[in-house]
Image (spheres, grey):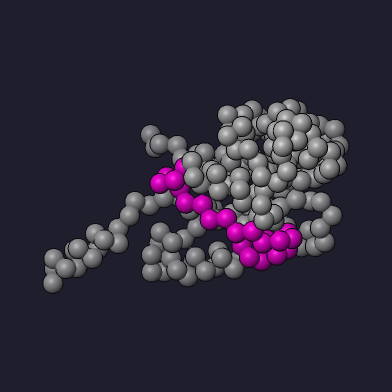
Amino acid sequence: MKNRDSLRRRKSFREPRARFLIVCEGEVTEPTYFKDIRHRERGIIELEIVPAGVPKTVVERAVQLKKGSERDARKDENLRYDHVRCVFDVDAHPFLAEAKEQARANAIEIAVSNPCFELWFLLHFKDQTAHIERHKVQHQCGEHMPGYQKVPPCDTLMPLRDAAIERAIQLDNWHATRDTVGGNPSTGVYRLIQQITDACRPPG
């Protein structure tokens, strides 16, 4: 009996890895991008991407899944999410303030892009401090990524990621000096990318 129990314990054992739940607004662009990261970092972290519509629905789905993981963690602590992040745009969505408040109330982090997620892509190629509309962001993305529609060319973006992070940080600092944090243009996606990067970094 002792040997059988020992074998059972060894079979269920796995090295703990950081678990990220990303609930995003889009059904193509954002999931494609984060799935590429999951592919590159397989075996190191776990990413679960769940497209969920408008911001309020995104947050509600994240709350539901987070609570589910906490219930599952009563049996296996490895099933708890270490990071839960909602990714959505400002755009012209209703109930945006309510979505942000619900996220705060449930200790869920958000990565908001103003005006749209593609601003994060654009920052891989250039600085952007002037106010810019969604269609203009998408048009400029097409100039830097020929043929771009909704599926990002991740092989093109990946080598430029550090530059994008630096531009996004500078943009946040620029807004902070003007008391316009979260204004157009801005994106919090870089913080999520930094979290994932830190989780993938070897210890020591």
Q: Is residue 170 visible?
A: no
Residue 184 placement, left or right of 169: right
Tally of numbered discs:
0
Residue at x 80%, y 45% (from the top left corner): 115
Query: Which sits in the foreground, 167 or 174?
Result: 167
Q: Is residue 125 left or right of residue 135?
A: left
The answer to whether residue 90 is left or right of residue 84 is right
Pinpoint residue 52: horizontal percent, then vertical percent.
Answer: 67, 62
**Residue at horizontal 69%, vertical 54%?**
26
Name the spot of residue 150 as percent of width and height, x first: 70, 46
In percent of width and height, residue 61 lies at 63, 65
Residue furthest out toward the front: 147
Q: Is residue 33 above or below residue 71?
A: above
Would you identify the image quadrant in which residue 5 lies? bottom left
Residue 157 magenta-highlighted? no
Residue 67 visible from this viewpoint: yes
Tell me which segment is drawn in magenta.
41-62
Seen at 81% across and 32% down, the residue is 129
**In which quadrant is the C terminus drawn?**
top left
* Residue 59 picture quarter: bottom right
- On-image quarter of the N terminus: bottom left
Would you say 189 lies left or right of 49 here? right
Q: Position of residue 53 (x, y in %)?
A: 71, 61
Q: In the rendered view, tell whether residue 160 sits above or below residue 109.
A: above
In the image, 8 versus 172, the foreground residue is 8
**Image: 24 above or below 128:** below
